[in-house]
Amino acid sequence: TTVDGGAGRDLISIVAGGRGAVTIRNFNGAEKITLQGYAAGEADRALAAASGTPGNLVLSDGTKVNFLGATQLNAGSFI
């Protein structure tokens, strides 16, 4: 699945159980991501595990999230 953040503010939902790959293009920091069906702290865990490879996260169910052109990605990117 590919999502284009583009201009403006977007809310991107990733649902647990997909075990696939999600590519998010043009994530500019105005966008927010919500992780549905994941345990509390999932975003923090995935961000910590991604150190050294920012923009590529692997969630606890195996879902791979690749951020192309991300200008800002941190805990504040997730709600």
Image (tube, rainbow, N blue to C red):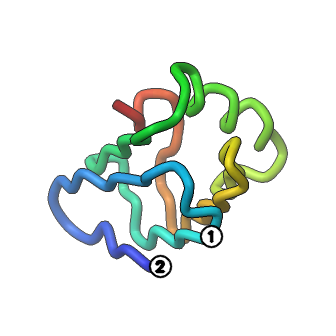
Q: Check the picture and name the quadrant holding the C terminus.
A: top left
Determine the secondary structure under disc 1. Answer: loop
Determine the secondary structure under disc 2. Answer: loop
Q: Residue furthest front?
A: 17
Q: Residue furthest left?
A: 8
Give me the disc on residue 1: 2
How many marks the image carries: the answer is 2
Q: Nearer the viewer, residue 14 or 51?
A: 14
Q: Label 1: how many residues lie within 10 Å, few (<14), some (14-19) or many (20+)?
A: few
Left or right, 72 with respect to 21, comes to left
Left or right, 79 with respect to 37, comes to left
Q: Tell me where residue 51 appears, x and y as whole percent.
A: 80, 39
Which amino acid type is marked by label 2?
Answer: Thr
Residue at left offset 15%, top offset 59%: 8
Residue at left offset 66%, top offset 61%: 64
Q: Is 57 located above or below residue 27 in the figure?
A: above
Residue at left offset 70%, top offset 42%: 60
Q: Residue furthest bottom?
A: 2
Q: Tell me where residue 56 appears, x and y as whole percent.
A: 69, 57
Is tag 1's residue or tag 2's residue first in the polypeptide sequence?
2
Q: Is 75 located above or below residue 3 in the figure?
A: above
How much space separates mark 1 and mark 2, taking CA atoms? 8 Å
Mark 1 touches mark 2? (CB < 8 Å): yes
Residue at left offset 56%, top offset 33%: 43
Q: Is 69 located above or below residue 43 in the figure?
A: below
Q: Residue furthest right?
A: 52
Which amino acid type is marked by label 1?
Answer: Gly
Give me the disc on residue 20: 1
Residue 62: quadrant of the picture = bottom right
Q: Label 2: how many residues lie within 10 Å, few (<14), some (14-19) or many (20+)?
A: few
